[in-house]
Amino acid sequence: MASYPPRMETTGLRERKKRQTRRALSDAAIALFLDRGFDAVSVAEVAAAADVSKPTLFRYFPAKEDLVLHRFADHEAEESRVVAARPEDESPLAALHRHFLDGLARRDPVTGLSDDAGVLAFLRLLYGTPSLVARLYAYQQRSEEALAEALGGGLAARLAAGQIVAVRRVLAEENGRRIAAGESADAVYPDAVAAADLAFRQLTDGLT
């Protein structure tokens, strides 16, 4: 019995080390991609820069594109988690609306409302590389499927999930468009909140 807590602690430490290694590999790769372009950098060069072997790198990231999309790992299926964790007296749409507004307030890059130079450079890399865009689309599809399951499954839930994901994407794209045009995140923020309120009000009226 006395050995049980240490085993749990060891497992937790191992998982933290894995996460740290994945982050270090991703950061090393993205630095190279930003400097030279995604297609101009080989996996072998990424492994060498991170001081690991190619087999080791592939154990953490099965595909080269995953080294970039790792930045989105915490956001995959995020909407479904928000719905599942909401208070009993809060509707799914209200929870998602609240969560999106929280993201705007934090200037979360996934809301499009970030004028951080590093974030903007990363987004240019992402959306300027066709293979990464294709990988991002697959990630978005998985998130949409998870949200549909959280909403109860079935055709009605799939239709609702598709509309919700599309609205969030359009809101982020509009915020990102204005940031890319030279506006600051602070300047765009009030309009971004108003647009989110409008969008989720339309969703609530339509889906109800």
Image (tube, rainbow, N blue to C red):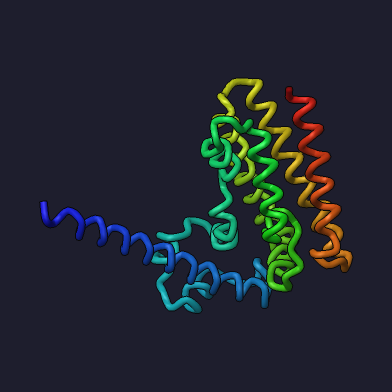
Which quadrant of the view contains residue 56? bottom left
Instruction: Answer with left or right where residue 17 lies relative to residue 103.
Output: left
- The relative height of residue 32 versus residue 88 in the rendered view (above or below) is below
Instruction: Answer with left or right where residue 98 lies relative to residue 196.
Output: left
- The relative height of residue 131 versus residue 79 in the rendered view (above or below) is below
Which quadrant of the view contains residue 51? bottom left
Instruction: Answer with left or right where residue 44 lies relative to residue 11.
Output: right
Image spot of residue 99 (x, y percent): 65, 46
Q: In the current view of this chain or complex, which residue is farthest to the left?
A: 1
Residue 173 visible here:
yes
Which quadrant of the view contains residue 10? bottom left
- The relative height of residue 146 versus residue 101 in the rendered view (above or below) is above
The residue depicted at 60 percent of the width and 41 percent of the height is: 79
> How many marks can you see?
0
Image spot of residue 60 (x, y percent): 43, 60
Of residues 183 and 131, the one nearer the viewer is 183
The residue depicted at 81 percent of the width and 65 percent of the height is: 186
Q: In the current view of this chain or complex, which residue is farthest to the front?
A: 89
The residue depicted at 64 percent of the width and 27 percent of the height is: 158
Residue 142 visible here:
no
Image spot of residue 200 (x, y percent): 76, 37
Image spot of residue 2 (x, y percent): 11, 56
